Image (spheres, rainbow, N blue to C red):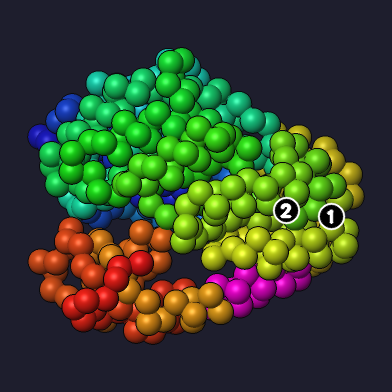
């Protein structure tokens, strides 16, 4: 009998790509995809370990999924949380049958067989050679795709668990990435997002990230090229030049700042100062007209004073971020930040986070209000969650709701931005003769 597998995904784009990879691994071993847990013989939760609340959500969800488990069914936890907790997760959750880290997905069929036979197990070993080159990812059909080009991280930011859950940094060969992108383009994908923990530090021993951008951007059928997440000081002149001169590269960059205070950045072990960060930002904007910039910011990092937090608030305005993903510092056992003194009281950190959210959102609303009336090329990606509209995206990474039929998915449209909720736009077909921004 064919086994059916259901995978629920939490966390970053890398986890989404890893879920597609797991479906590929299991698909070639006779498993079929299930859309709901009650239809599945195997239920896997692909997890994030970056923040404590993400792990708590997973713990709660695993408890809920247990009610669908029948004799012989398998419930597994995979991904970064699985890697972080290892065999202790089997002790904490008696109905979890297996725990699998990001470098062990190739072993899933064997591990699932053991679990179905009643043998609980964990595989969280790092494999520095593993890129899953021979495993075609099983993706949902659509005009966009994630392509992992780098796994792991060699930076040791004191707040970050990623080096301990994804292992050392290693990059795929450029030729292998280009081959995968060619296959995607032949299947109708026109927008590709390259993924890596510090993606612009990509180097396969012969080629750097700038060369990778040029090579992928030259693939026939690739009309748009994005990447995430970069590290600020890995934007070399060669990488910026490649971004500026490769037509497919979109006019948007996600540039994590984390803090606007040099003192906090030092405690975070970020390898730049506020001034250096702003210099990189200026070089990017000078090279790429119309560039939009999003960022990550943390409030309440250990030792952060009110004055230092104020420097982060000021950075929002000084840098002119178009969008910001804001977080309250989350203690991660196993990271160096746990050992830092002067942890900020939770109530203070929460209050700072709210002020940071308010400042970032107010700036996003103001900038987006100024964009109403502009004309953009958009790619229609998928149906919106509500209202019977289609969701499209500009090259500058703004979401636009359009009144179009589902048959428009995958098409490029020229639209005028007619309104904004503050974060998302509404749009309508542009009249002839208007220049596209």
Q: Residue at 65% across / 75% down in the picture?
A: 358
Q: For this rendering, which residue is in front, 156 or 247?
A: 247
Note whether 165 is above or below 250 in the view shown. above
Q: Does 146 appear in magenta?
A: no
Left-right relation of 296 to 170: right
Secondary structure under the numbered disc 1 in the rendered image = loop
Quadrant occupied by the N terminus: top left
Q: Are marks 2 and 1 in contact (CB under 8 Å)?
A: yes
Note whether 348 is above or below 211 in the view shown. below
Q: For this rendering, which residue is in front, 423 or 242?
A: 242
Is residue 58 something that shows in the picture? Answer: no
Residue 261: x %, y % from top left: 80, 53
Q: Nearer the viewer, mark 2 or mark 1?
A: 2
Secondary structure under the numbered disc 2 in the rendered image = loop
Q: Which residues are magenta?
A: 351-365
Q: Residue at 34% across / 79% down in the picture?
A: 417
Q: For this rendering, which residue is in front, 199 or 211?
A: 211
Left-right relation of 373 to 82: left
């Amino acid at each position: 009998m064919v086994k059916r597998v259901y995978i629920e995904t939490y966390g970053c784009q890398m986890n989404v790509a890893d879920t597609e990879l797991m479906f590929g691994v299991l698909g070639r071993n006779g498993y079929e995809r299930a859309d709901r847990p009650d239809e599945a013989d195997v239920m896997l939760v692909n997890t994030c370990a970056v923040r404590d609340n993400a792990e708590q959500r997973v713990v709660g969800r695993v408890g809920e999924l247990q009610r669908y488990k029948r004799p012989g069914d398998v419930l597994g936890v995979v991904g970064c949380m699985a890697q972080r907790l290892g065999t202790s997760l089997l002790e904490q959750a008696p109905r979890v049958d297996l725990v699998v880290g990001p470098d062990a997905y190739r072993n899933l069929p064997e591990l699932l067989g053991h679990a179905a036979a009643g043998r609980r197990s964990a595989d969280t070993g790092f494999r520095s050679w593993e890129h899953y080159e021979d495993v075609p990812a099983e993706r949902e059909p659509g005009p966009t795709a994630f392509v992992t080009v780098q796994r792991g991280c060699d930076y040791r930011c004191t707040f970050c668990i990623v080096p301990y859950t994804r292992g050392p940094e290693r990059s795929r060969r450029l030729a292998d990435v280009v081959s995968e992108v060619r296959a995607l383009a032949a299947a109708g994908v026109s927008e590709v997002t390259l993924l890596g923990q510090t993606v612009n530090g990509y180097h396969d021993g012969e080629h750097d990230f700038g060369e990778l951008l040029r090579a992928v951007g030259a693939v026939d059928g690739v009309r748009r090229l994005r990447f995430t997440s970069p590290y600020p000081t890995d934007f070399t002149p060669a990488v910026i030049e490649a971004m500026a001169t490769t037509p497919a590269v979109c006019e948007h960059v996600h540039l994590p700042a984390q803090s606007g205070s040099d003192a906090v950045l030092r405690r975070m072990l970020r390898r730049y100062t506020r001034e250096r960060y702003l210099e990189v930002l200026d070089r990017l904007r000078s090279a790429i007209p119309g560039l939009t910039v999003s960022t990550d910011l943390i409030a309440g990092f250990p030792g952060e004073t009110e004055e230092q937090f104020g420097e982060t608030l000021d950075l929002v305005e000084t840098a002119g971020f178009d969008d910001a993903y804001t977080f309250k510092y989350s203690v991660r056992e196993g990271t160096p930040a746990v050992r830092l003194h002067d942890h900020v009281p939770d109530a203070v950190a929460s209050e700072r986070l709210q002020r940071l959210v308010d400042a970032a959102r107010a700036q996003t609303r103001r900038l987006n209000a100024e964009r109403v009336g502009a004309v953009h090329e958009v790619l229609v990606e998928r149906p919106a969650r509500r209202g019977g509209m289609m969701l499209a995206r500009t090259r500058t990474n703004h979401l636009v709701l359009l009144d179009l039929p589902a048959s428009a998915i995958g098409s490029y449209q020229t639209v005028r931005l007619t309104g904004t909720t503050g974060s998302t736009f509404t749009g309508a077909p542009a009249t002839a003769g208007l220049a596209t921004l």
